Amino acid sequence: MIYAFLLIGQSNAAGRGNIANAPRLNNCNGRMKILRNGLWRPMFRPINPDRASSGISFGESFARCFADAYPGAEVGIIPCADGGSALSQWMPGEVFYDYALACARLGMRSAKLAGILWHQGESDCAPELCGTYCQRLQTMMTQLRQDLGMPELPILVGGLGEYLIGCERFPEVQNYRELNGQLQKFAAEDSKCEFVDASGLEGKADNLHFTAAAQLEFGKRYFEAYQKLGIPLAGDEVAAQGAAEGSGMDQL
């Protein structure tokens, strides 16, 4: 069985880590997959090619941790993130929402949708947007769960990086702490949601995107957050075994 995760948000969800700076991808003999044209393919990079600058995303290390923890299962990423997108563009009826919903439904034809991986907020850091972020995210996610027919679908929301304080190109992102507070509030009010802390993760020279190493570490944190939810998987063949030492993450 393939356990699928919908990857949505803006550029740090899509991934901008330099591929040349990352270890070789090991997709666990094809058990790590991505959805392409409605079909599951063995994972390759970049997993979310929204731009020519697409690179390493936390989605792949999340998938690797999942594959290591559940050796009898396959794990799939449904990549729908788009760089620079604001939360308003992810609301029900907007293009990004409709596209993600359609892709998720296609993936669900041959996989079990097991969660949503969300990272977005840099485009909503301005004070006039930040204060309503939690409420707006609740509206979007509630409708997405409803449209998918999964009212308790797990959601993981990642925090914004501390390096944003040094971003001069888009000074509004220096308000990232308030946005992180909104993300934490969203997670605290939803029993099927966890906040993923980005503290200490390194940013690229643009002070806007995570490095490749930071993305890979972030994916591990996303998986640890998923484990906190205690979501049981179907079938004895995917009984949780935990990621053992020397699992091969160094080859990711």
Image (cartoon, rainbow, N blue to C red):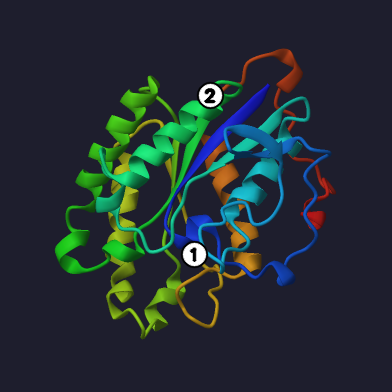
Residue positioned 27% across, 39% down in the render: 140
- Closer to the chain start, of discs 2 and 1, is 2
How many numbered discs, if any?
2
Q: Is residue 6 visible?
A: yes
Q: Is residue 141 above or below residue 153?
A: below
x then y, percent, for residue 147: 33, 25
- The one of 9 and 234 positioned closer to us in this rendering: 9
| Element carrying mark 2 | loop
| Element carrying mark 1 | loop
Residue contact at pointers 2 and 1, CB within 8 angstroms: no
x then y, percent, for residue 98: 35, 38
Q: Is residue 187 visible?
A: no
Q: Which residue matches tag 2?
A: 108
Q: Quarter of the image holding residue 67?
A: top right
Residue type marked 2: Met
Q: Quarter of the image holding residue 73?
A: top right
Horizontal placement of 216 versus 29: left or right? left
- The one of 158 and 93 positioned closer to us in this rendering: 93
x then y, percent, for residue 241: 75, 29
Q: Which residue matches tag 1?
A: 199
Residue positioned 23% across, 52% down in the render: 133
| Label drawn at residue 55 | none
Please tell me whether mark 2 or mark 1 is closer to you in this view. 2
Residue at mark 2 to residue at mark 1: CA–CA distance: 33 Å
